[in-house]
Image (cartoon, grey):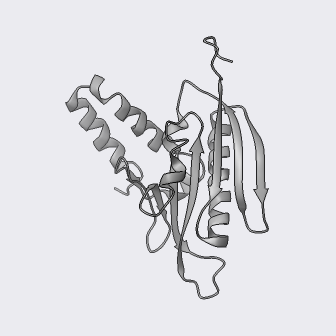
Amino acid sequence: MNKDGTNSHGKLVIACGSGGLESQDWCLILFRMYVCFLERWGIDYKIVSFNRNTIGIFSAEIHFEHSDKFSLESESGIHRLVRISPFDRNQRRHTSFVSVRLNDSPMYNELSHESEYGNQIRSYVMHPYKMVKDHRTGIETDNVHDILSGNIELFLGITMLEKTESKIPEKVLKAIKDHVQTIGRPS
């Protein structure tokens, strides 16, 4: 419990959506991404449920200590993956969806109504080019491996920055956003 009596734990729920085996593998990849992020920041966490199959996972739930350094609230939503499927003998391109929900997010109870194509918050493209794009902020990077290794601060930071936009002079805010958009792009 926090000093004010509120719960100091967050709950992250990851569940595969449409996409079959691809989606289950994508769910496992995102699970690893969040675990790597929490470990890198030294955040205590506990895996509460982990519904595995032979390829990936159907769902997982992680409880973690809240941190004043970041908020995972902006991660709530649909995460979309586009890649050549390692499970398709014909090596066709597949699209998979995974739902990520946080209990400390205002979206937590609304997500079930928005878990459909077109409502994704972020796309991870691995074919025909490599890119991760946040659809809410427009921020994108071609460093997909870095993001999937748990380095998601780029997206967490810009979301937290936008919450405080009214307190930042417009000229400074534009310079920060311009700088963030160049991260991960070749010079």
Q: Is residue 8 left or right of residue 111?
A: right
In the rendered image, residue 58, in percent from the top left (x then y), is placed at: 71, 60
In the rendered image, residue 103, in percent from the top left (x then y), is placed at: 60, 36
Q: Is residue 14 above or below residue 74?
A: below
Residue 43 in view of the camera: yes
The N terminus sits in image quarter: top right
Q: Is residue 121 left or right of residue 4?
A: left
Residue 29 in view of the camera: no
Outermost residue toward the top in this view: 3
Q: Nearer the viewer, residue 143 or 152?
A: 152
Outermost residue toward the bottom in this view: 90
Q: Residue at x 64, y 55 (%)?
A: 15
Q: Is residue 83 left or right of residue 60?
A: left
In the rendered image, residue 169, in percent from the top left (x then y), is placed at: 23, 26
Outermost residue toward the left in this view: 171
Q: Is residue 53 above or below residue 172?
A: below
Q: Residue at x 41, y 38 (%)?
A: 159
Q: Nearer the viewer, residue 186 or 67?
A: 67
Q: Is residue 187 above or below residue 128?
A: above
The image quarter containing residue 54 is bottom right
In the rendered image, residue 78, in percent from the top left (x then y), is placed at: 51, 55
Q: Nearer the viewer, residue 147 or 11?
A: 11
Q: Is residue 126 left or right of residue 61?
A: left
Q: Residue at x 63, y 11 (%)?
A: 3
Q: How many marks?
A: 0
The image quarter containing residue 176 is top left
